[in-house]
Image (cartoon, grey):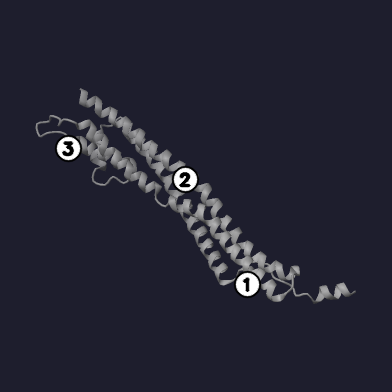
Amino acid sequence: METEAIGGMAPEIDFSLLALFMRADIVVQLVMLILIAASVWSWGIIIQKTMNFRRARAEAAAFDEAFWSGRPLDELYERIRENPATPPERVFAAGMLEWQRSHRTDGALIAGAQSRIDRSMDVAIAREAQVHGASLTVLASVGSASPFIGLFGTVWGIKNAFEDIALAQNTNLAVVAPGIAEALLATGLGLLAAIPAVIFYNKLSGDSDEITGGYQAFADEFSTILSRQLDG
């Protein structure tokens, strides 16, 4: 009966995520808010990049179809030269522009045309690769730093929990558990932010390299076509 009475008198502690956050120290709360913001930022980048890469693949496929359709390349260039809207079009336009600039007024070619055309397309590809790789460093930073930020919040929270134990001079689990739970929540949020960031950083980096490799393959094929024209 005495045990039941003591149990009945014990206050009920709310261990919901919101309650743990509200009871946490201001430093731990700040750590949690930083991790939540980092997670939201990461997911925004992940969604945006996934959509951008899907569109880039579709644009590359559409341009390949137009390029290999058998129509004259000059006609294709005239159609897109004023406003090349997609990365493959910009790479193609860079090569064609240098091809046209390499002709003298009498129709003869200026020496070194092939190397200049290749460099022009390489520069265009490098620009597109930079665009595709933009923001991926944020995912890498979130993935590497979030666990340590969460660990800092946990260490700080456990320090506060031990201070509360010392002040209360009571090692009862009911006194210890809330503080430790609040501290561990910071580590949990750190892992929640880091794991998706690391996984999608690796995936999206691979996608970016694959798409950029497709641009490079096209540039090599186009360069080969122009090389035949030069040799002829």
Q: Indicate the amino acid at tag 1.
A: Arg
Task: Report whether 39 appears left or right of 17.
Answer: left
Of badges 2 and 3, nearer the viewer stands: 2
Q: Which mark is residue 32?
A: none
Q: Indicate the amino acid at tag 3.
A: Arg
Task: Report whether 162 appears left or right of 200.
Answer: right
Q: Which of 75 and 88 is in front in this view?
A: 88
Quick check: 43 above or below 73?
A: below
Q: Residues within 10 Å of mark 1 (few under 14, many from 20)?
A: some
Q: Indicate the amino acid at tag 2.
A: Leu
Quick check: 133 above or below 167?
A: above
Marks 3/1: CA distance?
A: 70 Å
Q: Quadrant of residue 79?
A: top left
Q: Residues within 10 Å of mark 3 (few under 14, many from 20)?
A: some
Q: Which of 51 and 151 is in front in this view?
A: 151
Residue bearing the label numbered 1: 23
Q: In which quarter of the image is residue 55?
A: top left
Instruction: Tell me where residue 152 appears, x and y as whole percent.
Output: 56, 61
Task: Report whether 112 appears left or right of 13.
Answer: left
| Of callouts 3 and 1, the N-terminal one | 1
Could you tell me which residue is drawn at 25 percent across and 29 percent down?
A: 226
Could you tell me which residue is drawn at 21 percent across and 26 percent down?
A: 230
Residue bearing the label numbered 3: 101
- Say if residue 76 shows up in the picture: no
Marks 1/2: CA distance?
A: 38 Å
Quadrant where the N terminus lies? Answer: bottom right
Residue bearing the label numbered 2: 204
Could you tell me which residue is drawn at 47 percent across and 50 percent down?
A: 140
| Of callouts 1 and 2, the N-terminal one | 1
